[in-house]
Amino acid sequence: MPVPMPTVAQVCELPSLMEKVIPAAWLDLNGHVNVRHYLELYDAASWPMLAALGVDERLFLERRQGLFDLEHHLWYLDELHVGDTVTVHSRILDRTAKRYHGVMFIVTARAVACRVPSSTSARAPTSRPAARPRCPTCSWRTSTE
């Protein structure tokens, strides 16, 4: 049974995290936008989304914490073409003190081109001190773990 997909108009009701014109350099030898660039868009759009959650350089540099993708899936729904202007939109579906689960959409004027229907990331220390103290509560922590 097909999963119902939102329309371009519905996705565009979500905040836009970034906009980019697809460059010719993204074409692969088959004349298609290479898969790695869909992930590049996902990665670039993650930073404004995290900033909206209060996660910034301070978490990484001062608290020595980082975020790591645990899992993500890409659904290719329409092809990106050189010259397309795309926007990336997201919605956080759930979060705990250490993880968040969200969905992202890459949208062109004609279609929802790609959906990242399941993206789970976790917060973890970026170094291993001799005795690892419990990480102070982040501003994006919720009451449930």
Image: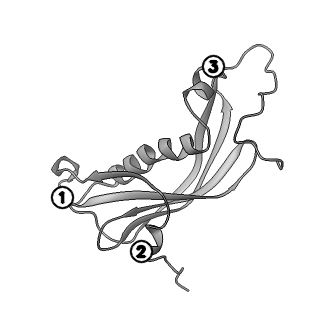
The mark that comes first in sequence, 3 or 1, is 3
Number of other residues with Cα within 10 Å of mark 3, as a class: few under 14, some 14 to 19, many 20 or more: few
74 vs 37: above or below? below
Residue drawn at x 64%, y 55% as measured from the top left: 101
Q: Amino acid at mark 1?
A: Gly
Q: Amino acid at mark 2?
A: Ala
Name the residue beneath numbered marker 1. 83
Name the residue beneath numbered marker 2. 9
- Closest to the camera, between mark 2 and mark 1, is 2
93 vs 49: above or below? below
Q: Amino acid at mark 3?
A: Glu
Residue drawn at x 49%, y 41% as measured from the top left: 47
Residue drawn at x 62%, y 28% as measured from the top left: 59
Drawn side of residue 125 relative to residue 72, left or right: right
Name the residue beneath numbered marker 3. 62
58 vs 40: above or below? above
The mark that comes first in sequence, 2 or 3, is 2
The mark that comes first in sequence, 2 or 1, is 2
Measured from the top left, where is residue 48 in percent x and y? 48, 44
Q: Of residues 80 and 51, which is closer to you in this image? A: 51
Drawn side of residue 128 relative to residue 10, left or right: right
Measured from the top left, where is residue 65 in percent x and y? 65, 28
Task: Tell me which colouring the rendered structure shows.
Answer: one colour
Q: Residue furthest top?
A: 130
Q: Secondary structure at mark 3?
A: loop
